[in-house]
Amino acid sequence: MATQLRELPPVRIFVSSAAFAFKALFSWLRPEMWLMQVFTLPLFEMAFFVYLASFVAPTTPNIAFIAVGNAMQVASFSSIFAVCNLTSEEKWQGTLIPIIATPANRFPLFLGRAMFQILNGMTSIVVGFVYANYVFGVDMSRTDFVTLAVVILITSLAMTGFGLMLGSVGLFMRTAMIIANIFLFIGHLLCGVNFPVTVLPVWVQPFSYVIPMTYGTMAARAAVQGANIIGIAPVLLQEIATGVGSILVGYLLFVGFEALARRRGTLEEY
Amino acid sequence: MDVWELPEKPEKAIVVRDLRREYHSSKGIFRKKREIVEAVKGISFEVDFGELFGLVGPNGAGKTTTIKMLTTLLTPTSGTANVLGFDIVKNVTDIRRRIGIIFGGERGLYYRVSGRENLRYFADLYGVPMSKREKRINDLLDLVGLKDRADDRVEGYSRGMKQRLHIAKGLINDPELMFMDEPTIGLDPEAARETRAMMKGLVERGKTILLTTHYMFEADELCRRIGVISSGKIVALDSPSELKRFVKDITVIEVEAFGVVDADLATIRRQPDVTNVSADLEGERQTVRIQTAKGSEFIPVVTRLLSRAKIMDVRTKEPTLEDAYLKLVA
Amino acid sequence: MKPELQTFVGSFRMSQLNFFSDPQWIIPNIMAPFVFTAVALVFFRNVSGPLALYAVLGGGMMGMWGNTLYGAGFALSFDRWNGTLEYVLGTPSRLVWIVAGRSASSAVLGLVNAFAVLLIAVFGYRAELGITNPLAFVVALVLTLASLSALGILFCSSFLLTRSAQLLTNGLEMPIYVASGSMFPIALLPFWSHPLSLALGPTWGIDAMRYAADVSYTGMGFGYWSDILVVLVSTLVYLAIGFWLFIVVERKARRDASLVEY
């Protein structure tokens, strides 16, 4: 392993690892299952909170707020859960050590894997908006769809970055799945999905503001009501900043954990 | 035997008649192609009580499939088999009560609980009477030498210890007949030796064992009779000494060399009177084994054909069971 | 001891031991119910009276359900990954009893979940809970738990044939939360979904629990005892179907070798 081998170009690793993730996902589950994930999960999560809100305040439930929030929140499943899963499934199947041992540029490797999940996430959000509009009657007549598309793209990317950071933690600990599960749902509470962040206790709010989704829901609502990109630029920039920040932190953690794990020999513990 | 006694003892422990098994698999994600693979193509054999019977063959020959059918994990596509007098399709529960199963490898234990709890669980699944359960567990732990680590989590066991726990687990229902699928695979030599000694001990105590392995020397050492499986069919079935007679007219020329390439081997294979050539070309010291009817007069031919390599030693050897096996499965 | 009971108890015990060897795995199970309850309590913050009970009961219910389904469906996947599935299948014990033991173990752990949610709601959110008829409540709770376990067994038999048990578990969790009226009356749901809701034993169980907890509750309108009856009957029906399905599935698995593929 000390031998110097030619470094493969990161782009090639990126593409081939994305393709690998795609194939691996489908060898593990059949397309029917994946379709179910994309199409039914958004519907039921949205339904749950919409009906709950209707129950509590029958006269003026803010359905639009909740439906849009939940449509965006759906991306959490793909981005966070899947990315964390990718690293923990690797561990399970014992392939982690050979990969870490290759001279490939390691971070593009994981980034490539995440790419498929980014697309998955975006598709899920779009499906979520379809439900919001047609099932729950959210008025999208004034929506700036281009802006919304940009919001969806940025949120998906940023959340995937967030997921990669969580995945880096999971690389080292046995608890990747647990972290993933926590962050899968905590968005409902922290990210302005069902109610504004300002409702939360003051000491909780800082946590909301480091998660990209918080900005995503704000931006999405604005776009649905007709704001254009200029109008929501500040929010989008903040979202990009949190996303990039997550990736950086994730990369540092990745490198750090890898070195630590090599010294301690804990990579294969699960 | 626990609560259920054998009705009346059948003549043979295992009787297999023309057993076949197909596998269906589908390839591809969207356009599924169905493939039918016949893993076992009509095998027949019998195993006596108190015998250690071996099924040997290369990977993919059908050994594991056969064992899975006989242990009732798979139903055959056609053919019949009786295990301890019970039909493998119709009397599944009767068979499962009376047999023990050991698959080789690390997996098959619950890592986060202790060895003792693993045994307790399987004792319950096998219906070992509560009055006998603890004593039997302790006896088995004694037998396999795990008494002092019994209450530690299995995840802390060494490979050899896990193997010993596997054996204890396989004996938890005090079975009459045991099936062992490559039990020594992946074990270090000492653990493998211990396992073999244990198998011999079990047979001495009157148990019947059907063993699959691809280690010829193991089959030679342990088995009274061996069935050689290749590509789903039994190509030979006899005692080790009888099987060696397959190759009694053959001499083995073993060459230790350096710099032999595949093309050389191909050339040797093309020679008349050469029945088989096998070689280990990895590493610095290469070994080539040539089976030939010609005997030591063939040696000059060999040295000539391998002239491009550097030959360090040439020996003639008596054919072993491995040679017989290689000839049979070629 | 009868073999079936021995299998059931042994399986229950192993399930508990496995769980307690790594207790942090409770977190995935309680995360969704906990978060959803928290959101519900935020929704309910300006509403007074027994509605808080809805939130807390619902959250507890979801905690129970998630854990049961998770325990039943995931347990066999766990065996598959662990390499123990073939050994377990090779024993003379019927698979349905092994799963029943695990399902029961998950239900008990689900109860612990429910308690956790309850405690957090009461102390964290200072929700007020008064239960009018504790005995009736406990009876309804236990029966709902049994109904959940039976449903778990039923679903597990279908999980046997797919590698994607985990995905299916996640996929079913939300629909059940919605359809069972755990946090809001099913009257709010579109009418065509009502038969589906009513086919779920736990829907009736939760209704019964609310009757026992709150005197003024009108709910589905059938009354406590009708609810209890339906829960009982549905539990038996689920068990019957589950038992039958397991026989079918075991036979099929031996034909296709589908169980032991990873």
Image (cartoon, rainbow, N blue to C red):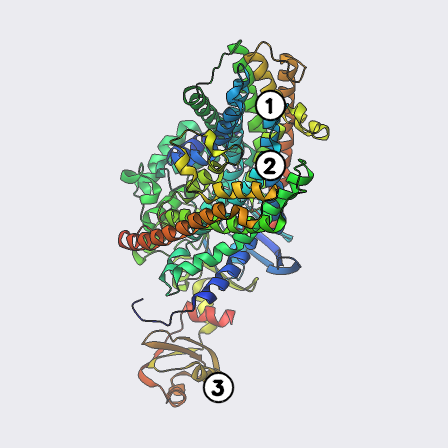
Residue B103 appears in view: no
Quarter assignment of residue A225: top right
Quote the CA–CA distance across marks 1 and 3: 92 Å
Residue lying at 43% horizontally and 60% vertically, measured from the top left: A108
Q: Are discs 1 and 3 both within one chain?
A: no
Residue A174 vs residue A36: left or right? left
Residue furthest right in the image:
C192
Quote the CA–CA distance across marks 2 and 1: 15 Å
Mark 1 closeness class: few <14, some 14–19, many ≥20 residues within 10 Å: some
Q: Report the disc number at residue B271.
A: 3
Quote the CA–CA distance across marks 3 and 2: 79 Å
Numbered disc 2: secondary structure: helix
Q: Residue A73 at x, y = what percent? A: 53, 41
Q: Residue C47 at x, y = what percent? A: 54, 18
Can you say which quadrant of the picture contains the N terminus of chain A?
bottom left
Type of amino acid at the residue the image marks with label 3:
Gln
Q: Residue C10 at x, y = what percent? A: 45, 31
Q: Residue C146 at x, y = what percent? A: 55, 24
Which one is in front, B212 or B30? B30
Q: Where is mark 2, residue-wise? A: A67
Type of amino acid at the residue the image marks with label 1:
Ala
Question: How many numbered discs?
Answer: 3
Which one is in front, C118 or B219? C118
Which one is in front, A67 or B227? A67
Q: Report the disc number at residue A57.
A: 1
**Pointers 2 and 1 in contact (C-beta within 8 Å):** no
Q: Are discs 3 and 2 both within one chain?
A: no
**Pointers 1 and 3 in contact (C-beta within 8 Å):** no
Protein chain holding label 3: B
Protein chain holding label 2: A
